[in-house]
Structure formats: C-alpha cells, structure tokens
Amino acid sequence: MAESNARYYADKKAIGGPSSYGGGDFITAPEVSQMFGELIGLWLADVWIRSGRTEPVHYVELGPGKGTLARDAQRAMARYGLEPRIHLVETSRRMRDAQLASVPGAIHHHDLSSIPTEGPILLVANEFLDALPVRQVVRTDEGWREVMVGLGEDDRFVEVPGRQPMDSAVPEARRDDPPGTVIETSPASAAIMFEVAGRLIDQRGAALFIDYGYRHGRSGSTVQAVSGHQSVGVFEAPGDVDISAHVDFAQMEQVVRSREARVLGTVTQGEWLRALGIRERAEALAQHSPQHREALMRARDRLIDADQMGELFKVMGLVAPHWPEGAGFPNYQAERPMTG
Ligand code: SAH
C-alpha cells in the first residue's frame, strides 16, 4: 500500500477539479467548495486568538493535495490577524509544484521532523491518514496470521496468510474471534498521532484530522481502491489507482490520550461544519453572487448531507494542555458570536 501510493501520488493526477467534479480519480472537500478551507481557517484563528495570540505561529498541513485548503484557510486566518508561516508536509514532487502555485512561499517538508520547534503549531490533515498503509491479521484455522501479498496464478497479486503465528499481536479479548475475522491497524497513522500529540505538548497548538472512518472499533478490512471516481479491485493496478483505508478514530484518540495532549472529540463532518456556520456562510456567498446560488447550495449539501460527505467523514480535534476548547466539539460553549 505504501509503495503503491508513493508511486501513485508521484505520477498521477489524483484529485479532481473544483468547478466540475470531473477529472482525476477522486474529489476532496476543499475542492468541492472554498467554504471548507475558510471554516477551518476560522476555527484555527478562533483557538489561536483565545489562547493568547502567541507568535511565531506555524500552520502545518499534512498531505495538502493541490494546496486549496491551505490557500482558503490562509485567507480566512488573515482576516483575523493570524498570518502564520505555512509548512506543507508532502512527499510527492508533482503535488509540491501544485501547492506552491496555490500558496507561494510555503515551506515544504518531507515529514514532521523538520518543522520548527518554537511557537505553536496549527495543524490540519484532510484525507491524509487514509492514504497511509495498514496492516491486517486474519484468524485462520491454524491461528492468527498476518495478511500478506503474494503471487497467485498468472503472476497476479493475491492475499495470502503469512507463515509466522501472530497470536501475540492480537488483544486477548479478540483472540477467540471466529475464523475469517480480520483486524486492521495503521501503525503509520498511530506514529503520526503520537508525534503530533508530542508537538502539542512541547510547543502548544491545535490540530484537526478530517477523514472518512469510524468512531467505534470495528473489524474487517476497509482497504479500497478508486480510479476515475469508480471503485476498483485493490490489486488491479497498483501504483495507478488510489488505495486507502478507513481511519479508526477511536484508536487515534487512544494514542493521543497516551500522552498528555487533549482530545476535543471526534464529530461528523456534517455536525462540525453546521456548528461552524456553513449554512450562514453559503447564504452570504449566494447573496453576494446570486448567479452561483444553486452551485453553492449543492456544494454545501455535498459537504454536510448524511448521504454525501456529512456522516462518513469525521473531524477529530486536538489541543495542547490548557488551550481553550474548539468550536464545534462537545464541550465548547460560544462566549459570543464571531463577527465579520
Ligand atoms: N488534503 C488534500 C489531498 C488529499 S490526497 C485534499 O484534501 O485535497 C493525499 C495527499 O497526501 C496527497 O497530497 C499525497 O501526495 C500526500 N501523501 C500521501 N502519502 C504521504 C506521505 N506518506 N507523506 C506525506 N504526504 C503524503
């Protein structure tokens, strides 16, 4: 999965265009509407202001795609006097070029290790964790084995159980699950969460992870592949199609709690965007450009409706110890509405 995605993001035009939803293999929330990045920018500005406006301050985005979210967030943050340095963590050269066109002056990083350690970080990752590789174990008649990729007939990739017993890697409560049960984990995602939580403790700040996934433990494989907006077989064309997996937010929260960073909660994207005022924002934009009203309302619905991106996508919020609650999460109580 890691190898396939590295090649895929290096060579392919993955993400579809903003105005029509066509082109590319998939479309992401920032490409659906500018409202998405703007509301994220406002959320960050709000916590930063209420935490005391510490400078220097760093905007950090993981896997920024075309740089659209960063650009929209930057514009919204600037309206509230927040002008952070922009750091983009991106491995694909092709994506880096697109990002610099959207956010001139952004600083690129291969991973989190080179991000400055002085001043709070305001970190955003949209559809990033789902691209990181997962591991799976399966209960066979001989016990638990890792799910490996081998060669089948015609030299095609197939899933095969590994030879090494993996029983000790399975939590005791799950060891007697019926044969055929698959347990999926993402050590790469857990490592990122661990590192981000550590950064929040050491240098303060806040983080938003947005992705499709589930809030409560679930078993079974969630690995999927898409090409040209259609679902395809995972082994059909490695390197040419996007391979992703659902994010296990309960597990991500557990990793963060194992350090002293604070989890604000994981809510659905629909709830979160509504709480942040997406309906009011869409209405204001429509009043300003009546000729775009229909498209704006369609984009809003696409982001928040339960049968579109509203339920499947979740937003997980994290903050440094002693930082304020964030808008749209369970413990937040608005002191007074933001204006402007
Ligand atoms: N956040 C963007 C793009 C999502 S696609 C959006 O919402 O539109 C995933 C992004 O993560 C791409 O930019 C891809 O190149 C990048 N990416 C994938 N694996 C990565 C890794 N291991 N390290 C850094 N970036 C990665």
Image: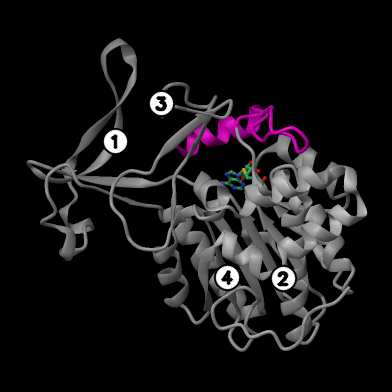
Residue 233 is tagged as 3
Quarter of the image with the N terminus in it: top left
Q: CA distance from mark 1 to mark 3?
A: 16 Å
Tag shown at residue 43: 2
Q: Is label 1's Cβ within 8 Å of ligand 1?
A: no
**Rendered image: mark on residue 317:** 4
Q: Is residue 269 magenta?
A: no
The residue shown at (30%, 46%) is 136
Distance from Cα at disc 2 to Cα at disc 1? 41 Å
Determine whether the residue tagged by mark 1 lies in a helix, strand or loop.
Answer: strand
Residue annotated with mark 1: 148
Give whichever of 338, 286 is nearer the camera: 286
Q: Position of residue 91 (x, y in %)?
A: 64, 43
Choose the circle earlier in sequence order: 1 or 3.
1
Element class at badge 2? helix
- Tell which circle, 3 or 4, labels the residue nearer the N-terminal end: 3
For the C terminus, the quadrant is: bottom right
Q: Which residues are magenta?
A: 1-25
Q: Mark 4 or 2 closer to N-term?
A: 2
Sequence-wise first label, 2 or 3: 2
Q: Residue at x 58, y 59 (%)?
A: 269
